[in-house]
Amino acid sequence: MTAIKLGIVGVGKIATDQHLPAIAANGDFHLLASASRNASIDGLPGFTSIDEMLARQPEIEAVALCMPPQHRYQAAHAALTAGKHVFMEKPPGATLSEVADLEKLAQAKGVTLFASWHSRHAPAVQVMKSFLAKHAPSKVEVIWKEDVRHWHPGQEWIWEAGGLGVFDPGINALSIVTEILPNAMFLKSGVLEFPANRDAPIAADLRFTDATGLAVHAAFDWRQTGKQSWEINVATGAGELRMADGGAKLWIDGVAQELPEEGEYPSLYRHFASLVKNGQSDVDLSPLRHVADAFMLGKRKEVEAFDS
Ligand code: NAP
């Protein structure tokens, strides 16, 4: 396959930290240009909008969309309409309905739509999934607690409606849980804590179950100073799985596991290349659906105002 000519849209933290190195290391992609209102990439043509980029560089075959989720639909719609393959950062959109619309458009245009979930590509995830396919889980505990001031400085969009607040990292945990569990889970109850001056939650406590009555508890909190926790613990009859560092580390019954070395973003781009090559899309909305359910079913509690 000749390298897929790529454009990247929304040059911020994740584009710079992860997408650019992963693209540079993958011979299946050739980065041609960027589109971002303020930022650009050294040595590449830079445009201030996706429309301008697609008009001026029609040879682009695919785009990676790295802007905040509230603006993903418009960009994805423009790219799909122009017949380009689309890689969307997580979360894939601000609503479920808009992503369903994109899915239909991609199908009609015969191009690939990839709603990526980077945490599913963490080294521990497929090992946990294989283990749980053989040994049924009896209890799941998710602890996703980080310091928003450290990880999201200056990101005002994350506190706005559609920015998801603490679900921006929490959806990563949900993307792992929905990948590794053998049965579909669904929300039973939840409490969402909203700072008095914000439109998105700073913490969430969620209780899920499945058809077998499995108890899945998730605690997300953005007020965590000191030790940061991105952990999932799963009890089974054959021992406990303990996943840490967002899926970079795994112990089974106290024994540290040897894990694959490929990073999340190199794995994501390998998957995207294979989807394009095989004429497929990959759009699993279950993590976003659980977040939507939490907003629908969860109790809302107002907590003290948050100033960054
Ligand atoms: P970010 O640093 O704020 O970068 C996003 C970029 O998008 C901005 O720098 C901005 O560049 C552009 N943009 C376009 N329209 C925008 C608008 N209306 N408001 C604000 N920015 C706009 O955010 P990020 O951390 O890279 O996150 C982007 C996406 O990646 C999010 O969906 C996030 O969940 C996901 N993600 C982030 C991380 C992480 O560790 N940060 C990890 C995985 C996934 P211009 O000003 O040049 O337009």
Image: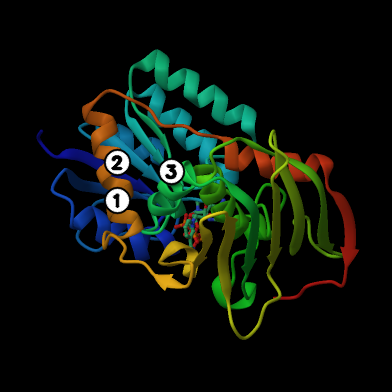
Q: Is residue 131 left or right of residue 144?
A: left
Q: Taking 1 as reference, is 267 above or below it? A: below
Mark 2 — residue? Answer: 271
Q: Which x, y percent locates residue 115?
A: 45, 38
Mark 1 — residue? Answer: 267
* Residue 5 location, quadrant: top left
Q: Which x, y percent locates residue 36?
A: 41, 52
What label does residue 191 carry, if any?
none
Camera sees residue 300: yes
**Element on which disc 2 rests:** helix
Q: Is residue 259 left or right of residue 282?
A: left
Q: Is residue 53 left or right of residue 70?
A: left
In the rendered structure, which amino acid carries the disc numbered 2? His
Q: Is residue 278 left or right of residue 184?
A: left
Q: Taking 209 as reference, is 45 above or below it? A: below
Mark 3 — residue? Answer: 116
**Looking at the image, do the residues carrying marks 2 and 1 touch, with CB atoms under 8 Å apart?**
yes
Residue drawn where x is 46% and y is 54% of the image: 119
Q: Which x, y percent locates residue 285?
A: 56, 35
**Looking at the image, do the residues carrying marks 1 and 3 touch, with CB atoms under 8 Å apart?**
no
Residue pushed farthest top? Answer: 108
Estimate the spatial distance between the alpha carbons at disc 1 and disc 3, rounded to whole Å: 11 Å
Residue drawn where x is 39% and y is 57% of the image: 122
Estimate the spatial distance between the alpha carbons at disc 2 and disc 3, rounded to whole Å: 9 Å
**Element on which disc 1 rests:** helix
Q: Nearer the viewer, residue 59 or 55?
A: 59
Residue drawn where x is 19% and y is 57% of the image: 24
Q: Which one is in front in this view, the residue at disc 1 or the one at disc 3?
A: 1
In the rendered structure, which amino acid carries the disc numbered 1? Ser
